[in-house]
Image (cartoon, grey):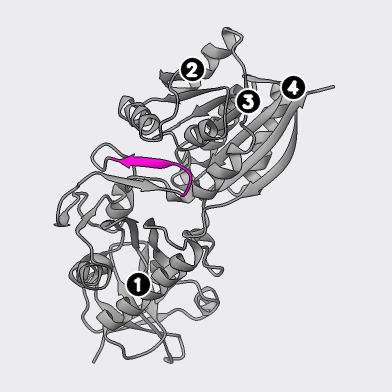
Amino acid sequence: MNPKAFIKKHHDKRIRNGHLWVYSNEIERIEGECSGGDIIDIHLADDSFFAKGFYNKHSLISLRILSYKKSKKLKDLFQERFQKAFELRNLLYPGKDSFRLVFGESDLLPGLIVDKYNSTFVLQVNSVGMERNIDIITGILKEDFNAKNIFTKSDSAFRKMEGLSEVDIIYSGAKEKEIISDGTVSFNVDFEASQKTGFYFDQTINRITASKLCSGKDVFDGFCNSGGFGLHALKQGAKSVTFADSSAEQLAQVRNNITLNSLSSDVCHFHESDLFDLLEKLKSEDRSFDVVMIDPPAFAKNKKNIPTAIKGYRKLHKLALGVIKGEGFLVTTSCSHHISESEFEDIINDAAVLSNRSLKLIHKASAAPDHPKLSSMPETAYLKFLIYHVSSMS
């Protein structure tokens, strides 16, 4: 008999509405022997079967719902989910070879992220259930997607929460460099030197949108990473682009990408610096830009960090507004799930008041469509992307 988890009475509304996580404090009891990564039956308080899911007693997320049907082989289920995810991306990005193939819960593959770079597949395995079944996953990538290279670049914080080791593994091939294109700009992807899985696919559409403001303009690309926003600005004919990042490796990738795209480096400036320090220095030197674009890492990785994150975002935006010309544009993003869109807008408005600047919000967006939001799970939406027209207070 399969082990069973029973949900406490009056604690099932969220999962009935399509949420895929059951927290440890919502479980009344477990019947039968089970260990981390086992697939167990999930029953409601009245003993009725509800779903099947991965179990992990060492995680706050004790159950991750996989299926609402009692019987289906896991490989068949995974193949079906992978195929549907691939068909959606083909519809969204016809002819593209590189994109986020699997976005965890949004593609009903909880705790698994797969980014496709031509025939290289980079995984983030963030649940013990997916870790236990990694052979099925890599087998599908080889058999159904002709994967040449398969390896992990997982988020160590998520793996730590799941009780998993923080060591990345090569399952097939090697960490070979890839060249990808977003349709406008090409990128060298060096997996050894890159952050996250190698590239931020979530900003693909947003880079193109922001670039439309940049023709003939002096542009600042802060937290530039491999240069995505600034490279698009150059493609659109920016007068100059200043790339800034605290990582020498990322700035080296920017230079490589400028060469790859046959763009002029004569109009480019590079700063290896802490962004807060650099913006203060630029302000003291009366340097200013028509378009300032900032794409910082997550300041609030958990709820405890929220107060500190709010202060950090407020200071960052005050500094950014301080180097925008009398009339210009602020392009800003936040990937902190724990800071809502409305909170983020309030923070930026506070910074504008402190800077004596007037803001008009002219565009807002989220992640690219290969990062779909599961409507029943707010946790699958994290990216805020905002563009403001900036002027002086009159």
Q: Which residue corresponds to mark 4?
A: 356
Q: Earlier in the sequence, mark 1 or mark 4?
A: 1
Q: Which residue corresponds to mark 2?
A: 278
Q: Which residue corresponds to mark 1?
A: 82
The amino acid on which the numbered mark 1 sits, given as a three-letter code, is Phe
Question: Which residue corresponds to the image point at 35% horizontal and 31% vertical from the top-left?
Answer: 250
Nearer the observer: mark 3 or 4; the answer is 3
C-alpha gap between disc 1 and disc 4: 50 Å
The amino acid on which the numbered mark 3 sits, given as a three-letter code, is Gly
The amino acid on which the numbered mark 4 sits, given as a three-letter code, is Asn
| Along the viewing direction, whichever of 338 and 78 lies nearer the viewer | 78
C-alpha gap between disc 1 and disc 3: 44 Å
C-alpha gap between disc 3 and disc 4: 26 Å
C-alpha gap between disc 2 and disc 3: 24 Å
Q: Which residue corresponds to mark 3?
A: 216
Number of other residues with Cα within 10 Å of mark 4, as a class: few under 14, some 14 to 19, many 20 or more: some
| Along the viewing direction, whichever of 282 and 158 lies nearer the viewer | 282
